Image: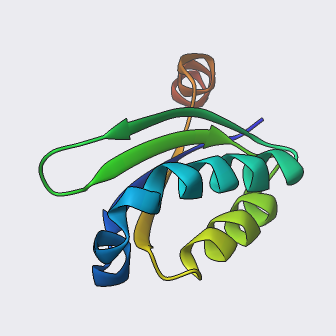
Amino acid sequence: MPTYIALLSYTQKGMENIKESPSRLDKAREAIKSAGGQLKSFYLTMGGYDAVSIFEAPDDAAYAKTILSIASKGNIKTQTLKAFTEDEYRKIISSLQ
């Protein structure tokens, strides 16, 4: 299953309701699961982003639908990185000519 890394930033609304963020994370986990994916990890971070999540989804469309649904609540802004496993990386590199 493809892996996605989401870099998350709280919006003003998200910060105003920060104490509700653990329950929002639980709801996001359920939304990902309902889409056939899995939240692999979540980290509160310091620096350019407020949090980072890593999850798997069946495909890009399922990921996009899920992350857009989560972000549409107005509590976070996201930037997504599609990740490749080490095995996928090795296959890609070995196919270079």
The residue shown at (29%, 71%) is: 15
As drawn, 63 above or below 94? below
Count of all numbered marks drawn on residues in the image: 0
Q: Is residue 34 left or right of residue 28?
A: right
As drawn, 5 above or below 38? below
The residue shown at (76%, 49%) is: 30
As drawn, 87 above or below 75? above
Front residue of 85 and 52: 52
Front residue of 97 and 81: 81
Q: Is residue 96 left or right of residue 55?
A: left
Front residue of 91 and 79: 79
Q: Is residue 95 left or right of residue 52?
A: right
Which image quarter is the N terminus in? top right
User: Residue 55: image x %, image y %?
Assistant: 62, 40
User: Residue 17: image x %, image y %?
Assistant: 37, 71
Q: Is residue 96 left or right of residue 66?
A: left
Q: Residue furthest left?
A: 47
Residue 97 visible in the shown view = no
The residue shown at (80%, 60%) is: 62
Residue 61 visible in the shown view = yes
User: Residue 42: image x %, image y %?
Assistant: 46, 37
The residue shown at (74%, 50%) is: 32
Q: Quadrant of residue 18?
A: bottom left
Colour style of the rendered protein structure = rainbow
